[in-house]
Amino acid sequence: MRTKRAGKATQFTSVSIPTQLFKKLEKEIEGTGFPSVSSLVAFVLRMLLTEKKTGKGEYDIESIKKRLRELGYM
């Protein structure tokens, strides 16, 4: 799958997660700025990679939730 964003073609792939987790995430993103579970997962993974590169290393769920709240997503 490809989409265009800011003049660049972005390619996508599929990642499998347990159905139960997917359903929980669907409920969690209701009323947030995330249009889909996929966009939430991509955001969290980008955030984890950024933290790894900067050496912050905060990978616990509470730090992720805090960051999402700071950004207005929760």
Image (cartoon, rainbow, N blue to C red):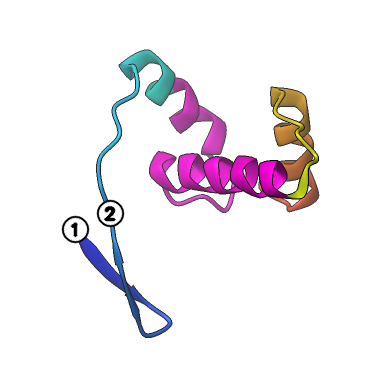
User: Count the marks: how many?
Assistant: 2
The span picked out in magenta is 24-53
Please say whether residue 26 is one of the residues in the magenta stretch: yes
Front-lying residue, 53 or 25: 53
Rendered view: 24 above or below 35? above
Q: In the visual, does 54 lie left or right of 73? A: right
Q: CA distance from mark 2 to mark 1?
A: 5 Å
Measuring from the top left, give residue 74's x and y in whole percent.
69, 41
Badge 2 marks a residue whose secondary structure is: loop
Q: Residue at x 57, y 41 (%)?
A: 44
Query: According to the image, label 1 marks what residue?
Result: 1
Front-lying residue, 8 or 26: 8
Measuring from the top left, give residue 31's x and y in whole percent.
57, 44
Rendered view: 5 above or below 52? below
Q: Residue at x 40, y 23 (%)?
A: 23
Measuring from the top left, give residue 6's x and y in whole percent.
43, 82
Query: Amino acid type of disc 2?
Result: Phe
Q: Residue at x 50, y 43 (%)?
A: 40
Q: In the visual, does 63 lie left or right of 1? A: right
Front-lying residue, 70 or 33: 70
Disc 2 to disc 1: CB gap under 8 Å: yes
- Answer with the quarter of the image where residue 57 lies: top right
Query: Amino acid type of disc 1?
Result: Met
Q: Residue at x 72, y 23 (%)?
A: 60
Query: Of callouts 2 and 1, which one flags the residue occurring earlier in the amino acid sequence?
Result: 1
Measuring from the top left, give residue 54's x and y in whole percent.
76, 49
Badge 1 marks a residue whose secondary structure is: loop
Magenta stretch, main secondary structure class: helix
Query: According to the image, label 2 marks what residue?
Result: 12
